[in-house]
Image: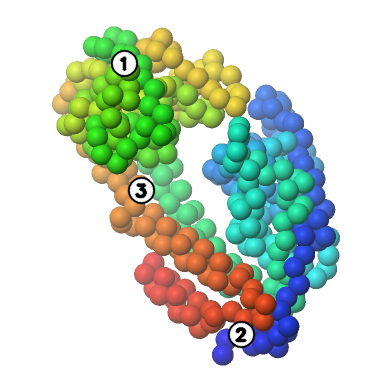
Amino acid sequence: MSRLEELIQELCLDGVDYKRIDEICDISRGRVMSKDYIQANQGEYPVYSSQTENDGELGKISSFDYEGEYLTWTTDGANAGSIFYRNGKFSITNVCGLLRVNKDYVITRYIYHSLQIEAPKYVNKGMGNPKLMSNVMARIKLAVPPLEVQREIVRILDSFTLLTAELTAELTARKKQYEYYRDELLKPQESIPIVTLKEISTSIYRGAGIKRDQVTEEGIPCVRYGEIYTTYNTWFDKCVSHTKEEYVSSPKYFEHGDILFAITGENVEDIAKSVAYVGHDKCLAGGDIVVMKHQQNPRYLAHVLNTSMAREQKSKGKVKSKVVHSNVPSIEQIRIPLPSLEVQKRYADVLDNFEQICNDLNIGLPAEIEARQKQYKFYRDLLLTFAETGNTIVTDRQTDRQTDRQTDRQ
């Protein structure tokens, strides 16, 4: 019998108590902080906002609003309901909520793991942006077993999250290494001419709208602008979506070698993200996509348009808001180094090999991270599901064996 089973049989024979969040936590919201404010008050203390990348960090300022152990959650937007554990000195923006445990019979990290399951269930995904506001968070009920049981559950689940965090840190370091190497390899040189995209494009035009409910399992391949952010990396050869030509009144097509730009996005830093299409089907470009035709190496263009130099040009003059836009004239003015076709191919081949190590989900660290995340979710859901009798079916030996096997593969 595992330690957790022993504790449950000893302490939870009559089931467990359920508590509302507002019975065990103080609830508050962050304050408005613009990007200009953060840039003007740069310092050492993190400011967290609604994004999930980089643990939600928006920047660092010279002061802090909170110190200690807290939970934060995203109240508005695509990431509404995302839960984060914080411990230290920090601030949050007005699109974040804050929880501080105020009862000595509750462990903050236990609430963190529990809300990973429960909070997404309460997100309002109706009209407008998804939301999980404070009054709704307050009503969420969680099982609150005795402290000894909470500690054991936290110990088991934290062992999974720690392993995932270590792998994620290693993958992040590899990606930064790749980005540094790419930027160095493709930076301007005296021997290589600098050109604008307008000078090298043979045609550049916007796509036509394809609604979500017009996406089909079969038909003509297509790309919607959001997929450029979420689905495709530097280049791709097959579309994940299809539609029917009769759905689009004025269809716009792209073909082998074309570059696609997403001209609508949620933040300035990623606006006009671009990918190259290297497949051989004739495909439809959705609305808010700009298609650029050319006679260069498409994989080289895809890499050089993802460099820091190109991204800075894409975001120049854009205003941070809920939705950020670009356009054809702005894209045409982007300047890039353009070596000969032979050199373009050589650069592209080198960078493709390096990028595959970082991004291919079928090998290496990304696949391992994905497996760990699935494993964590499985045991989290199992451990935090309390029946009326307080019984659970997972054993400590099972989780230990899983962890040992994963560790051996590192």
Is residue 372 visible from the viewing direction of this image?
yes
Depth-wise, is mark 3 or mark 2 nearer the camera?
Answer: 2
- Tell me how far mark 2 sits from mark 1, CA to CA: 63 Å
How far from the left and from the top, in percent, is residue 197?
Answer: 32, 14
What is the residue that sits farthest to the front in this orientation? 246
Residue 62, quarter of picture: top right
Picture residue at 39% right of the left edge, 22% below the top: 209
Provide the residue designation for mark 1.
250
Mark 3 packing: few (<14 Cα in 10 Å), some, or many (20+)?
many
Q: Earlier in the sequence, mark 1 or mark 3?
A: 1
Picture residue at 47% right of the left edge, 24% below the top: 264
Amino acid type, mark 1:
Ser
Q: Helix, strand or loop at disc 3?
A: helix
How far from the left and from the top, in percent, is residue 294?
Answer: 23, 17
**In the rendered view, would you say 63 is above or below 164?**
above
Image mark for residue 358: 3
